[in-house]
Amino acid sequence: MTKKTFGVIGVCGANGNLIARILNERGYDVIGTDLSPKEKCRFSKSLEGYDIELFYGETPDEFFEKSDYIVPPASLSKKSAIFQKIDKSLFELNDVIDNFHTEKPVFGITGTNGKTTTTTLLKKIAYDNGIEPAEHNLEKMQGNAEYIPILQSRLHGDVAILEVGTFGVPGTVKRIVDLSEMEAGLITNITPDHLDCLGSFMDYAHVKGEFIEELNGKQLIVNGQDPTIMGLLKEYGFEGDLITFGVDWKPERVNAKECVCGREIKVKEIISGCGYYFCGCGITTPQVDYIATNVDLKNRTFDLHTPEEKLKVQMAMDGLHNVYNVTGVIIAAHEFLKLPYDKILESIATFTGVEGRMEKVADICGKEIYVDYAHNPAGVQTVLSQFNKLFNDFTCVITVSSESGYDGDLTIFNHALEFSKYVVPASVASQKIANEKLKQDPSLSDCILFDHVDDFVKKGTLGASYDEVLDGIKKALETDCDMIVAIGEAATKFKSCVEDI
């Protein structure tokens, strides 16, 4: 294709922004337009440094005159006024994907919990060792679903390290793995989430299973102590380079988890949904390739037995779930990035975690306030159990509205009751459950601090407003606990409310 000028409509949207940058990085002349004014263009910062002429607030005739090809957003109606002005050849989203390939190694990370921490840490290790990952640079956009990972893989970089998410829609994971030209990946765990979109845990698990299906014959790193992952590997007949990992830790409880065969498996859990298990269909905890032993949560250390040697690992993060995350990353950095263990361990020792994950945000009158993004039952159980191990008594502020609906909200509330000394329901969903529980058992008023039900309308997992989070933390400060843990998307989104206290 000879050098042409591409006119990209909608550069303030994620896809338009990424497409404009891909084309410009490949040496093409690019001009962009968006109806949003520059000050309201969400991703304008990521366009800085690119040689792209931009028209904000309107699409002048000059835009069409200068363009040889027009790149419209997929959502643009053919009946819209701007589409009616197009008199040039179209170059659409699928044309970008078909004509421009990744041209670099691509690694994907999926799972229900731990994806962002794992992805961010693996990228840090890459940067620390002079390897540049492709970055979408879309401010405050997680970018783990739809077409963002696919387009991100085509941006400048030595490698692409992609977080692969799903809103529970079949085919989405398959599309990301296929179109990003992924050659290896890691699965952290598979636990219930998005169930009001799909209806059953196995439906959701099979959406994640698309990751296994698409990487069959390639390299896959998995949590071998998750029976769902191991069951899907068997179901899909995975025959690639499989590497398993796990943690040597005394199980803390026994919980049931549905097996891919339809039976109920009793899992002696180390963390939620993962541990020691056996099912009559033949699924059982394997002897893993990498095992973390001698875990010292207080000092954040553990020994990692690899196929070659034993490593002494020093973390800068808290929690048993992060032992799993770090172990998976060590394998990925060694196997995929081809880095020596000593270089990997240096980076891990200085990684303090992702913003919004077990993050301390304030110390008010001697009381420490943490926020954590945990928003599904397994994530909440894991995080709160870790806080309980590390710090004993604390007050939990719930800002969650589960994507699994009422059952998810109820399970989250029960986990908060199990691990916390006091529970403050800040989200509407948790307030309704608190009201039900207090009617059933008034004695719970000693630990459930509840006044009324608000009227905030949930948005995904965002279950509380700024004021509700603020009021929840204020109420938590009145308890006799020296630690407050606010969980959920709203807690992390509105963490700045502590400045108003």
Image (cartoon, rainbow, N blue to C red):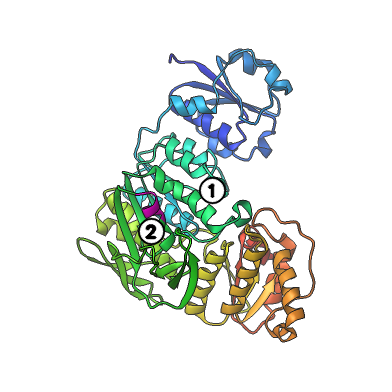
Q: Considering the image in quadrants, where does the N terminus appear? A: top left
Q: Which mark is residue 230?
A: 2
Q: Residue at the spot x=28%, y=51% of the render?
A: 335
Left or right: residue 264 compared with residue 413? left
Q: Residue at the spot x=62%, y=74% of the render?
A: 414
Q: Image height check: is 187 above or below 57?
A: below
Counting from the top left corner in percent of width and height, residue 482 is at 59, 80
| Near-viewer residue (62 or 243) | 243
| Near-viewer residue (36 or 296) | 296
Q: Which mark is residue 10?
A: none
Whether residue 233 appears in magenta in the rendering, the answer is: yes
Please name the amino acid that badge 1 sits on: Thr
The label nearer to you, 2 versus 1, is 2
Residue 108 appears anywhere in the view: no
Q: Could you tell which of marks 2 and 1 lies nearer the N-terminus?
A: 1
Counting from the top left corner in percent of width and height, residue 398 is at 65, 68
Please name the amino acid that badge 2 sits on: Met
Q: Which segment did they paint magenta?
A: 232-237
Counting from the top left corner in percent of width and height, residue 342 is at 25, 59
Determine whether the residue tagged by mark 1 lies in a helix, strand or loop: loop
Q: Residue at the spot x=37%, y=53% of the render?
A: 233
| Near-viewer residue (411 or 476) | 411
Residue that mark 1 sits on: 166
Q: Label 1 neighbourhood size at 10 Å, few (<14), some (14-19), many (20+)?
A: many
